[in-house]
């Protein structure tokens, strides 16, 4: 079967750094996506990794290791507005997105 | 970002009633997806269309659910008859340059 694992909830302090991990087992791999979803809103696209390594975009970075079936999202200089759920999704061999359950990130002052 | 307009934003109905959710992509796309999201089950793919043709509807829970895409600018998801367990947020999403973009969603409550 296909499976995406990520922690259910994480807590971090404003101004700090947090790393949200995602491991996956899917039938084929055609890219990994991270989305941010604020409560009551739609998921919004954050990042896309298809090759191994780190992709940096401002305060957010995403890392991928295909051999390990592993990715992480790194958020730096945390702000209160970063409190949200972060969804990991993998595009499988059929080019369909397999979604993780999401990680709820709580930022404390 | 590609735009997706969903309507209504909120729908409250009684069990047994028909519900129609609407989706209007407002910019170029290749595929259109209908998702359902609940606290218990997370984000679930119901059905997706490629070039207006339904490709995979294996996620549609029951025959009570049906979806159409008569043209590239419009799609509907219909539930008939609705049941309380259908209460969820329903998202429409489109793919543009390999990225999925979501509409704001319809929050459905079936009493």
Image (cartoon, helix red, strand yellow):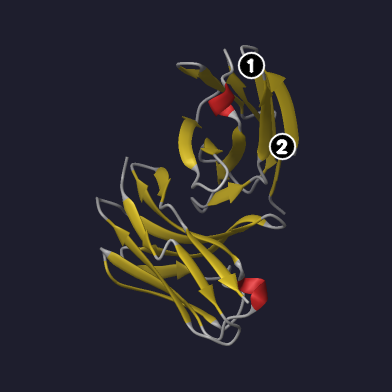
Which residue is drawn at the image coordinates 31% and 45% (left, top)? B2
Instruction: Assign the N terminus of chain B to one quadrant of the image.
Output: top left
Q: Position of residue A88 (x, y in %)?
A: 60, 38
The residue that mark 1 highlights is: A14
Q: Earlier in the sequence, mark 1 or mark 2?
A: 2
Q: Position of residue B39 (x, y in %)?
A: 68, 54
Which residue is drawn at the image coordinates 64% and 14% (left, top)? A17
Q: State left or right for residue A51 relative to residue B7.
A: right
Q: State left or right for residue A20 relative to residue B45.
A: right
Q: Nearer the viewer, residue B107 or A29?
A: B107
Q: Position of residue B37 (x, y in %)?
A: 59, 57
State the SS at label 2: loop
User: Considering only vertical position in the picture, is A85 above or below A11?
Assistant: below
Task: Tell me, for residue A6, which label it has, or none.
Answer: 2
Q: Nearer the viewer, residue A55 or B20?
A: B20
Instruction: Assign the C terminus of chain B to one quadrant of the image.
Output: bottom right
Q: Chain of mark 1?
A: A
- For marks 1 and 2, give the one nearer the viewer: 1
């Amino acid at each position: 079967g296909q499976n995406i694992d990520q922690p259910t909830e994480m807590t971090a302090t404003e101004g700090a750094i947090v790393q949200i991990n995602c491991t996956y087992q899917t039938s084929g791999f055609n890219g990994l996506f991270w989305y941010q979803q604020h409560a009551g809103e739609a998921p919004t696209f954050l990042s896309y990794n298809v090759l191994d390594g780190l992709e940096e975009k401002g305060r957010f970075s995403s890392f991928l290791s295909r051999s390990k079936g592993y990715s992480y999202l790194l958020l730096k200089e945390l702000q209160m507005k970063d409190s949200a759920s972060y969804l990991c999704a993998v595009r499988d061999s059929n080019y369909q997105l397999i979604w993780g359950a999401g990680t709820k990130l709580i930022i404390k002052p | 970002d590609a735009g997706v307009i969903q309507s209504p934003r909120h729908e409250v109905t009684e069990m047994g009633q028909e519900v129609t959710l609407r989706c209007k992509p407002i910019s170029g796309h290749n595929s259109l997806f209908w998702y359902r999201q609940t606290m218990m089950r997370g984000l679930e793919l119901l059905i997706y269309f490629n070039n207006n043709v339904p490709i995979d509807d294996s996620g549609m829970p029951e025959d009570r659910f049906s979806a159409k895409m008569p043209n590239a600018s419009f799609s509907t998801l219909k539930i008939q008859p609705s049941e309380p367990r259908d209460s969820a947020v329903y998202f429409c999403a489109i793919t543009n340059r390999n990225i999925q973009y979501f509409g704001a969603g319809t929050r459905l409550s079936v009493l």
